[in-house]
Image (cartoon, rainbow, N blue to C red):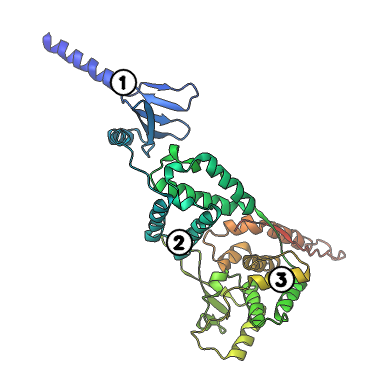
Amino acid sequence: MILVLMTNSMDTEMAGAKRSHKLTTTSADGKWKTFHGHSGLMQYVPSGMFFARAKVDGVVKRASLETEVFTTAKDRLRLKINKLRQPPAELGTFAEARLLYLADIDNDHALSPETKRYWHYRVTALLKSWPGLDKMRLDEIKEARCREWGKHFAGEFEAVNFNNTLGALRNILKRGGLGHDKNPAMRLKRLGAKPKQMTLPEPEQFEAIVKTIETSGAGQARHCADLVRFLAFSGCRISEASQVLWQDVDFERGEMRIHNAKRSKTTSAHDLRFVPIIPAMRQLLERLHRDTKPKPTQRVCELGECEKSLTRACKIVDVPRITHHDLRHLFATRCIEAGVDIPTVSRWLGHVDGGALAMKVYGHLRRSHSASMAQRVTFGAALEPEIIEPRLLTMAVTA
């Protein structure tokens, strides 16, 4: 009899313990859930993420457990609460946090050299736009001052530049020891990066631009014009064009070997791609090869940039300004208008998504070409098909 009573008592206790961890309370706004059987454990309902909560010196502190799994959250809870109860580390200057952040960037083996240089450039832009920031202690950087900087910077630069510079600011403050809730830069909203509206030149306008550059009288005028032609005839990024050597040009196969610039070190995609030599490119390469008699290890393009000459020529020809990267879009546009399918153009551009990005950027060209080709279809010999050749200039650019 005693054994039965003890067994029933143990069963009751186990059942109560089993039910206790399921008992929860949800906040009035429905966003937070607390667990009665695990003091300090909370879950943010919209995301499912678990948090640890502790009251230290009358102040409630909360930190993410970085998991959406209940059992994992339980295992991490005690350690996180102990960490919340530790006295905060003394905050240093922004310069000290900045150096730590840049060291993390430089030591990240998964980042390409181009990506590392980009984040260094964003930090430099931040320091130029916020005089005296480096000397400030982190606890002196308040939300109001961050908003003042944000208003000035957003008024001077495009949304993408603002968002990435803000990201650098947030990460530097975080690296210096400011958590999410105390990081004043976290309360600045990112800007909506709208697709850039671009107008590409017609063939005759492109020729006028190149001719203007070539006859400008500048010392490097001919090389500038040839670089513009090379970018437009190959679809290369400017950083890729500077790496093309004469040994990468195969006249017999009719293709060039291009070293892909935007390639993460963690991807298994190829570092090289092969771009066909279109007729205009062949004329350019044959002329350059005939005039310079280059060695295989020499660069095809003498110059590494031609932005100022390109901007000046567009102004003289009276067409909207185009950049190095716009010439890449010009190549893709001409290929698609000539009937090349988008997946093929995507491979020529070095995309690894099977054409998804190219379809997003250039899909309207494909549809217009399809409409043009549809006018060639006829069911009667007496009817002459009406040929429509739409000229599409305006496009939304996101690549």
Q: Which mark is residue 312?
A: 3
Residue type at mark 1 is Ser
Task: Examine the rendered structure and indicate whether residue 381 appears above or below residue 105.
Answer: below
Tell which circle, 2 or 1, labels the residue nearer the N-terminal end.
1
- Nearer the camera: disc 2 or disc 3: 3
Query: With 58 as the anchor, is 366 left or right in this view?
Result: right
Find numbered disc 2 in the image and state the secondary structure of the residue it sits on.
helix
Query: Residue 116: horizontal and vertical position, in percent?
Result: 45, 61
Residue type at mark 3 is Arg
Residue at 51% x, 75% y is: 243
Find numbered disc 1 in the image and state the secondary structure of the residue it sits on.
helix
Query: With 350 as the anchor, is 384 left or right in this view?
Result: right
Tell which circle, 1 or 3, labels the residue nearer the N-terminal end.
1
CB under 8 Å between discs 2 and 1: no
Query: With 239 as the anchor, is 365 left or right in this view?
Result: right
- Residue underneath mark 1: 20
Residue type at mark 2 is Lys
Mark 2 nearby-residue class (10 Å; few <14, some 14–19, many ≥20):
some
- Nearer the camera: disc 2 or disc 1: 2
Residue at 51% x, 40% y is: 143
- Residue underneath mark 2: 116
